Image: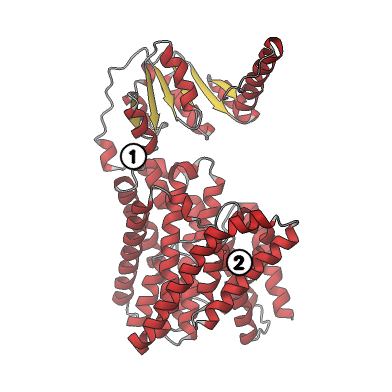
């Protein structure tokens, strides 16, 4: 009991440090769990394994809830390309380096597989912290994570069956297909069932959510495959809207508790790395951090049709290993395929890469790398545009902005990085430029410094300030923003802030007063 109490204490400390220094909690949980074992407190190995299994079920369950396929509509081909190529590239490089260093064949396979998948928990948290990221690169990143998670779960299920050949592999593959089909059917039916059921309170929703987790886990046990597949399938079954939001809200602290205990218990089982193991972990981390952004950037621009900066940011966001990598290593030890030393290496790479992600997957780093982009150096910056209106960021209200401008005879140039929006606007005959609206070269192509005025609809205030400085004081810059603090900063930089809430209220009052005066009921105006 003392050991479990210390694990809980280390988990609480890790979350406090993560909150204070804005770091991922997972590497801190592993490190502090490791520190606990160095205090000389005895911990029963079987008890630790039970804690790991319980936490593991909730971990894969939470990952499955985040990955709703409906988010990836229109990007399926790009997601498959990026997910498969990145998985194979990182895995192959990791395997080759492991063999070169001197690891055995089985250990090299596990290390390669561990390097090939990225953390769903870390990436999702970073995406939610970045306003507007889901509209640009976030959906593609989530889709790639789904491909990677499915691939690693297939490996976890099939690895124990490989020595038995096809007589063992075929039933495992069939069981996975049945599990996947059941999850897909439930993912489509559960939203309708829950809407009709009209569940009364959060406690009932929590019980129903846990019941689905236990049903899928029992189903996986009945089909004699790993309960990890059942946990992930249960999460996927609940990933549809609005079920995912209700399930995520109901699980809340319970899920955080079990995930924290899992990684703390995992850290308690990791051995102290010697200098050689530490250097090996750094070498494998370098493969993940250097190779992944390059592969993802190339494919995201080519197949995903993202702008260069969004593609680079997506690559940086995927440049870490996953909690599933450590899970795979734990299973490898239990099966007798690899040693505890290999687990320490894989866990070390996870700690290093996950810790660096919040510092690498930032706009600052993406802009530095953007200057090194070979295609960007060839980008034309000359423009014969002048006395026109530039719209930076089409957004959801872009159509209502350009209509009166075009009706008044002004020439409008629209800059947006969404290829679907640009394609549609080109069909309608508008002048468009696909690219990053805050990129100086894109601004030069759009003739922003010679425009009559500029309308900006971007989420990040820093980008708006950069645009204002680029065009200078002679070109008015109107920026649609959502917070008072952002309005003050834009105004102090020389721009003209348009507070969205105030604009919406003014438009509503105009409509209300008009209807009150005329006695007619008309549709309220768009804001």
Dot 1, how many residues are within 10 Å of its Cα: few (below 14), some (14-19), or many (20+)? few
The residue lying toward the viewer, choosing from 487 and 191, is 191
Q: Residue at x 34, y 39 (%)?
A: 371
Quadrant, the N terminus: bottom right
Circle 2 is placed at which residue position?
A: 29
Quadrant, the C terminus: top right
Colour logic? secondary structure
Tag 2 secondary structure: helix
Circle 1 is placed at which residue position?
A: 371
The residue lying toward the viewer, choosing from 112 and 422, is 422
Tag 1 secondary structure: helix
Residue 267, visible in the rendered structure: no
Determine whether 139 is above or below 105 in the image: above
The residue lying toward the viewer, choosing from 67 and 43, is 67
Q: Residue at x 54, y 41 (%)?
A: 131
Dot 2, how many residues are within 10 Å of its Cα: few (below 14), some (14-19), or many (20+)? many
Q: CA distance from mark 2 to mark 1?
A: 36 Å
Residue 341, visible in the rendered structure: yes
Determine whether 475 is above or below 13 in the image: above
């Amino acid at each position: 009991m003392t050991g479990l109490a210390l694990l809980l204490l280390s988990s609480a400390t890790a979350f406090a440090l993560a909150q204070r220094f804005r770091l991922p909690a997972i590497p801190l949980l592993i490190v502090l769990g490791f520190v606990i074992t160095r205090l000389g407190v005895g911990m029963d190995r079987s008890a630790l394994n039970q804690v790991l299994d319980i936490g593991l079920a909730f971990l894969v369950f939470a990952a499955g809830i985040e990955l709703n396929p409906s988010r990836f509509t229109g990007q399926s081909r790009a997601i498959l390309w990026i997910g498969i190529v990145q998985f194979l590239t990182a895995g192959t490089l990791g395997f080759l380096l492991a063999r070169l260093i001197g690891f055995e064949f089985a250990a090299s396979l596990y290390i390669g597989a561990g390097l090939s998948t990225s953390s769903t928990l870390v990436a999702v948290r970073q995406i939610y912290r970045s306003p507007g990221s889901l509209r640009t690169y976030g959906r593609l990143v989530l889709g790639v994570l789904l491909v990677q998670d499915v691939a690693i779960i297939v490996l976890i299920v099939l690895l124990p069956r490989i020595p038995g050949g096809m007589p063992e592999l075929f039933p495992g593959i069939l069981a996975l297909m049945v599990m996947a089909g059941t999850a897909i059917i439930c993912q489509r039916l559960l939203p309708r069932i829950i809407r009709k059921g009209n569940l009364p309170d959060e406690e009932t929703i929590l019980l129903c959510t846990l019941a689905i987790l236990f049903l899928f886990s029992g189903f996986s046990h009945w089909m004699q495959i790993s309960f990890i597949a059942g946990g992930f399938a249960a999460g996927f079954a609940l990933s549809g809207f609005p079920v995912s939001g209700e399930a995520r809200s109901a699980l809340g602290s319970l899920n955080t508790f079990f995930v924290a205990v899992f990684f703390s218990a995992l850290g308690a089982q990791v051995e102290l790395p010697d200098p050689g193991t530490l250097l090996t972990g750094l070498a494998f981390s370098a493969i993940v951090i250097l190779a992944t952004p390059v592969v993802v950037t190339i494919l995201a621009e080519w197949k995903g049709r993202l702008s260069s900066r969004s593609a680079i940011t997506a690559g940086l966001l995927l440049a870490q290993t996953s909690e599933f990598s450590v899970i795979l290593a734990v299973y490898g030890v239990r099966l007798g395929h690899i040693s505890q030393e290999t687990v320490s290496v894989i866990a070390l790479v996870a700690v290093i890469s996950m810790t660096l992600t919040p510092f690498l997957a930032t706009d600052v780093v993406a802009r530095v790398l953007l200057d090194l982009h070979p295609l960007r150096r060839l980008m034309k910056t000359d423009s014969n545009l002048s006395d026109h209106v530039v719209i930076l960021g089409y957004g959801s209200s872009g159509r209502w902005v350009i209509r009166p401008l075009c009706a008044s005879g002004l020439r409008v140039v629209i800059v947006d990085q969404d290829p679907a929006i640009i394609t549609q606007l080109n069909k309608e005959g508008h002048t468009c430029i696909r690219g990053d609206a805050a990129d100086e070269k894109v601004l030069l192509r759009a003739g922003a410094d010679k425009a009559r005025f500029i309308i900006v609809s971007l989420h990040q205030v820093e980008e708006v300030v950069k645009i204002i400085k680029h065009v200078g004081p002679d070109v008015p810059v109107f920026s649609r923003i959502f917070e008072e603090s952002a309005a003050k900063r834009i105004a102090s930089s020389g721009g003209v802030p348009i507070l969205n809430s105030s604009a919406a209220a003014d438009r509503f009052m105009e409509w209300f007063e008009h209807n009150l005066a005329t006695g007619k009921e008309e549709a309220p105006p768009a804001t």
